[in-house]
Image: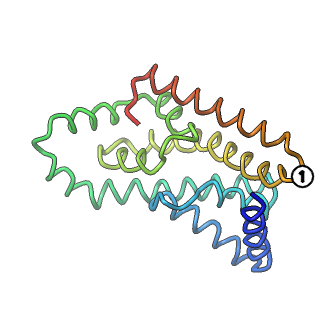
Amino acid sequence: MESIVELLEKVVEFIQGSGTLGVFISCGMMTIESILPFLPLGVFITITMLVLGKVWGFLVSWFFTIIGCCISFFIFRNGFGKKFDHLTENKELIKRYKKMFKDISLGKLVLVIAMPFTPAFVVNIVAGLCKMDFKKYFIALVIGKISMVYFWGYIGTSLVESITNPIIIVKIVISMALCYIIYLLVKKIFKLDL
């Protein structure tokens, strides 16, 4: 645990020492994470909040996460969407899922995006491929990402503080367990395949 915190502290020091460039690096990584899902979004949100503070760090993380999701959406809507349509034109099951996701209500879409355990890149890809109305997608993104960014920022910054105060680890575990339970309930109630 301490080696992770030491690594995180070194990254924060590097970003702080790099000034504006360091913040741009962190923001760029958050944007890229929405397209390349193997990058750890929670780490970038944590670093940004540690460097900029909780309020500015939250706002910057929220903004750049939305930018990355929109880029991903348009890549799959315009670039890969046509190839995907051609490959799956005879697949009824895929057509049904695309229609179901395209017709999802704004409220349900907000809930799906707001859950911290929902793979955001999957939502971006499916929304783009099914040609979802961008206005609906964008509104859901703006609202839903508030909860998700706050959750990962709280978890990350609290985890760093937990080295000196072990009670915080208990709060983090409880918070993550509650979010995951809510995610499972929403998934079951709305019969979402995510």
Residue 94 place in picture, x, y as percent: 22, 39
Q: Going 58% across and 66% down the picture, which residue do you hit?
A: 29
Say which element carries label 1: loop
Residue 38 place in picture, x, y as percent: 48, 60
**Left or right of 160 in this view: 114:** left
Q: Nearer the viewer, residue 73 or 118?
A: 118
Mark 1 sits on what residue? 164
* Quarter of image, res 102: top left
**Left or right of 127 in this view: 140:** right
Q: Residue lying furthest top in this view?
A: 189
Q: Residue lying furthest right in this view?
A: 164
Q: Going 34% across and 35% down the picture, which residue do you hit?
A: 101
Which amino acid type is marked by label 1?
Answer: Thr
Q: Nearer the viewer, residue 102 or 184?
A: 184
Residue 185 place in picture, x, y as percent: 52, 23
Q: Going 72% across and 32% down the picture, which residue do you hit?
A: 174
Above or below for 58 versus 90? below
Above or below for 187 versus 88? above
Q: Going 42% across and 28% down the picture, which residue do you hit?
A: 105
Above or below for 49 versus 28? above
Which image quarter holds the N terminus? bottom right
